[in-house]
Amino acid sequence: MPLGPEPYSPLQHGFDVDIPHWAGPGSAGSFVAPWRFPEFKYNKPKEHIEDRMAEEAVKWLGSLKGKQPFFMNYWQFSVHAPFHAKQNLIDKYRKVIDPKDAQRSPTYAAMVHSLDDAVGTLLHAVDKAGIVEKTIIVFYSDNSGNKYSEVDSNRPTSNRPLRGGKATMYVGIRVPCIIAWPGVTQPGSRSEEVIQTSGFYPTLLNQLGVSYPEDHPVDGIDITPALGGGKLDRKAIFTYFPHGVPVPDWLPPSVSIHYENWKLIRLFHQGENGAHGYRLYDLSKDIGETTDLTASNPEMVSKLDKLIEDYLTDSNAVVPKPNPRFDPTKYAPEKVGVGAKKFSLIKKGEKKKQGKKKP
């Protein structure tokens, strides 16, 4: 679970064990040994990191002997870049992929296979320990499919019919969430409620009877009603991403609100004369976010933007400020949303002023 290098690792945040004690976002060098984790050596040639991580997790779980409560935060490296997999699995999926399918990477399929194997290893260990009926299992991802890297001469995956993906503000950032909670969830049940990961914290604490001070800041809400098939008592969900990452469907620094069937995206200082820009979608009719309804629904834009402003104020968020040196005549807005490794929002023919280099 990478939080950061020392002194910001999990070991400084309440965890007793941190394997492989690595601050990077992906596997170090490769998923298949030899890898480059400085404090985690492989046991055999071509050992897969997910197999080894599952093995270490099962070993730790066994040391508890089923006699004490535990919290295991198991973050798989799959399916994050760099894109590597077991060669036999790559060969297996290369034989069955459809070249016309948007999801046609045999390497990515092989990575998902190893991820699935590791999950199965953990679930089997929980079953073998005889603690299935008193163990809460939550499976989810921190972001949706990557649409900008390249693997097997293609994008790793597709989020269709949703627009966008990782590092965007569109609904393509959605991920599935699977929860097995004895006495709370029913096997085979399904909920269409939209949740956020910030809801896990208050949900687990409340349902386990763990109290916290009233002045303790909590971002999420208890999502237990949704786990039982009910509705959540919440009007809106906010997503704040004050960055501009040049991936397909990227946007300048933005914040969005999902309110009933509506979704409004505020683009900071992207409107006329430095005002904010907006994009409004009716997700009940346009899940792919293809038609901007801002011009035809000014009252809804105003209503939702007020909720956004209240949210930013209440959360004491640091928000982007307008650039006093911005020159709209040199701006190329048509490049917004165009994915590229290197590009410029300066119009063609205009030269970016270079500052003096320090000696």
Image (cartoon, rainbow, N blue to C red):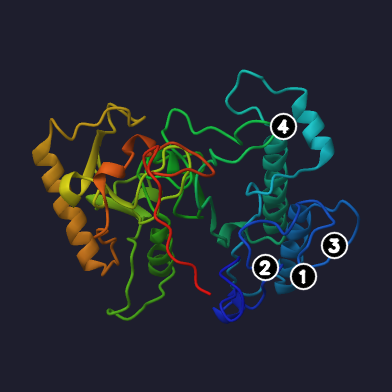
The part of the image, by quadrant, that contains residue 288 is: top left
Disc 4 is placed on an element classified as helix
Labels 2 and 4 touching (C-beta < 8 A) = no
Q: Which mark is residue 42?
A: 3
The CA span between labels 3 and 4 is 25 Å
The one nearer the camera, 186 or 170, is 170
Disc 2 marks a residue whose amino acid type is: Trp
Disc 4 marks a residue whose amino acid type is: Pro
The part of the image, by quadrant, that contains residue 5 is: bottom right
The CA span between labels 2 and 3 is 14 Å
How far from the left and from the top, in percent, is residue 101?
60, 22
Q: Which residue is mark 2?
A: 22
Q: Which residue is mark 4?
A: 106
Labels 3 and 4 touching (C-beta < 8 A) = no
Disc 3 marks a residue whose amino acid type is: Tyr
Disc 3 is placed on an element classified as loop
Assess disc 4: are there few (<14), some (14-19) or many (≥20) residues with their C-alpha within 10 Å of its C-alpha: many
Assess disc 2: are there few (<14), some (14-19) or many (≥20) residues with their C-alpha within 10 Å of its C-alpha: many
Disc 1 marks a residue whose amino acid type is: Pro
Give the mark, 2 or 4, whose residue is nearer the N terminus.
2
Q: Which mark is residue 51?
A: none
How far from the left and from the top, in percent, is residue 263?
26, 41
Quadrant containing the N terminus in the rendered view: bottom right
Give the mark, 4 or 1, whose residue is nearer the N terminus.
1
Q: Which mark is residue 38?
A: 1
Labels 1 and 2 touching (C-beta < 8 A) = yes
